[in-house]
Amino acid sequence: MEPKKVLVPVNGSKADDEAIKLACSMAKKTKGKIYVIYVIELKRTLPLEAEVGPEIQKGEGVLDHAERLAEAQDYEVETALLQAREKGSAIVDEAVERDVDLIIIGVNYEKPFGEFSLGTTLPYVLKNAACRVLVCREPIP
């Protein structure tokens, strides 16, 4: 698998770092392009272009961290801050729009109800993405 375009959705978790490092190492082989996105999920009561200051600041901070991490890997990434109703569909739509070969998603090992859970975003992406999806789960603590 030698991807030319890789999409890495981030949310500010520790698992993001490994996903970005993996994307950089894979893209270096093909001199591919890496897109890092942060999706702000908006309530249905708000318009999609609503100004949600704290969330925008958090997203910009996460994307800045992703850029610094990629620079440390001697790679350049393109970042984008998106606002959508649902993260999963925003990720799939962005993958189609950018015509990516691969989506790499970092997943934390979380047990919100006593059992490991993938949440709702990852299953949606796995079910609906037209390209390959690589899941990078952090180790069990």
Image (cartoon, rainbow, N blue to C red):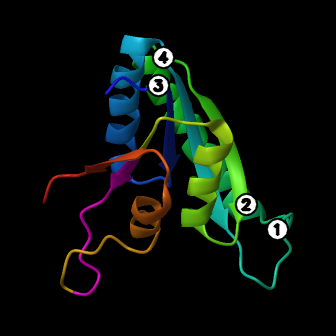
Task: Say which amino acid is labelled 1.
Answer: Leu
Dot 4 lies on which element?
A: loop
Q: Which mark is residue 48?
A: 1
Q: Are marks 4 and 3 in contact (CB under 8 Å)?
A: yes
Judging depth in this view, the residue of 109 and 122 nearest the camera is 122
The residues tagged by marks 3 and 1 sit, at their Cα atoms, a distance apart of 29 Å
What residue is pinned by disc 2? 83
* Distance between the alpha carbons at the discs numbered 4 and 3: 5 Å
Q: Is residue 72 above or below residue 121?
A: above
The reply, left or right, for residue 103 in relation to residue 95 is left
Q: Residue at x 66, y 62 (%)?
A: 40
Q: Residue at x 58, y 45 (%)?
A: 95
At which x and y percent is residue 112? Answer: 29, 81
Q: Is residue 57 left or right of residue 1?
A: right
Q: Which residue is mark 4?
A: 75
Picture quarter containing residue 100? top right
Which sits earlier in the primary sequence, circle 1 or circle 2?
A: 1
Instruction: Identify the magenta region.
Output: 105-113
Q: How many angstroms separate mark 2 from mark 4 (CA)? A: 26 Å
Give the mark nearest the N terminus, 4 or 1: 1
Spatial CA span between label 3 and label 2: 23 Å
Few, some or many residues within 10 Å of mark 4 (<14, 14–19, 20+): many
Q: Which numbered dot is residue 70? A: 3
